[in-house]
Amino acid sequence: MKGLDFMFISEFCRGIRLGEEASRIILDFRMEEEEYARLKQRFQTDCHSFFRQVTGTAGYRQMLLYLFARFAVDAYEEYRIREIEDNIYFDTFSDIRIWSEVCYRDYGEYGLEEYNWLQEHVRLQLFRLGRLQFQPIAYNGENLKVGQRLVEKHQLVLNVHIPEGEPLTPDEVSHSFRLARKFFRGIPMVYICSSWLLYPGLEQVLMAESNILKFQRLFYIYELNEASREAEQRIFRRLEANPNDYAEETSLQRAAKSLLNNGGRLGSGCGIYIPGERD
């Protein structure tokens, strides 16, 4: 790797606040530039083949951490061309840090297991603006009226994602939506979200004034997935066949475990939020 690239990789690791051990994996990784170029080309032209090849390699989680850090560095040029601020660049790619920490928690090693999701970031199809991430997509549901607005199938909307981390306070959420309005000029401010945070049954396990429920109430929830176990995965950090095996370290875990043991469900929901419109 060229010296200048190496220095920027170092800056990248600092910018996304990657820990020392994970940073060393990236900085010390050895790969010929010709091999990197071949893998990047495969990623760009046939990502399924790319992932099959890489995940079939010993130590693939560390390799993916290295590769996505390089992909992110390569994406910086396009950020500059589009005149997107550095803070948005580093905030967006902080997902690499978040998912490397999840990998350590789940597998005992720094790397990446949630590799498919990070495609959106390096292709500049998703951006983190404040607390939330936004992704322009075509709405694929049926025509839906929200307040006085009609949301039509295939229209361009902004898909909202909630990364792990800081509290989801109303002020931070409002700030993110204001940033999105400025950043995505020309795109109607119609937000969709599919998440366990939008499951109405959370009212049974959360305090009425919880930040999660305040976020949920912004959305008109138009679809539920009762079979989803995303909430269990997020709350307990793992899935168990028997709810009795779940931990009870937090009040949320205790309430969720009690609900599940008594035949309740924790699914996920899909919702639409249009500022100024109420159902």
Image (cartoon, rainbow, N blue to C red):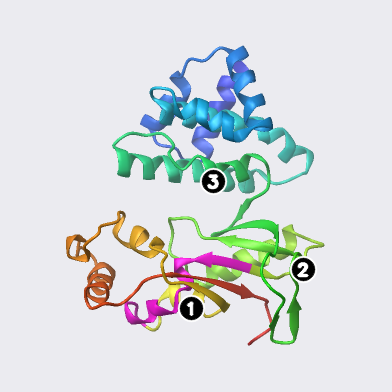
Label 1 Cα crowd, 10 Å radius (few <14 / some 14-19 / many 20+):
some
Pointer 1 residue: 214
Q: Earlier in the sequence, mark 2 or mark 1?
A: 2
Pointer 3 residue: 117
Residue 89 visible to the viewer: yes
Query: Does 193 appear in magenta?
Result: yes
Whole-angstrom CA distance, mark 3 to mark 2, is 25 Å
Whole-angstrom CA distance, mark 2 to mark 1, is 23 Å
Looking at the rendered image, the disc whose residue lies closer to the viewer, 2 or 1, is 2
Pointer 2 residue: 188
Residue 69 visible to the viewer: no
Q: Residue 113 in the image: x percent, y percent? A: 43, 39
Mark 2 secondary-structure assignment: loop
Q: Which residue lies furthest to the left in this view?
A: 244
What's the amino acid at mark 1? Answer: Lys
242, 254: nearer the viewer: 242
Whole-angstrom CA distance, mark 1 to mark 3, is 27 Å
Label 3 Cα crowd, 10 Å radius (few <14 / some 14-19 / many 20+):
few
Mark 3 secondary-structure assignment: helix
- Magenta-tinted stretch: 192-207
Q: What's the residue at 72%, 76% (across, down)?
A: 143
Query: Does 67 appear in magenta?
Result: no
For the N terminus, give its image quadrant: top right
186, 263: nearer the viewer: 263
Looking at the rendered image, the disc whose residue lies closer to the viewer, 1 or 3, is 3
Q: What's the residue at 33%, 39% (across, down)?
A: 104
Q: How many marks can you see? A: 3
Mark 1 secondary-structure assignment: helix
Q: Which of marks 3 and 2 is nearer the N terminus?
A: 3
What's the amino acid at mark 3? Answer: Trp
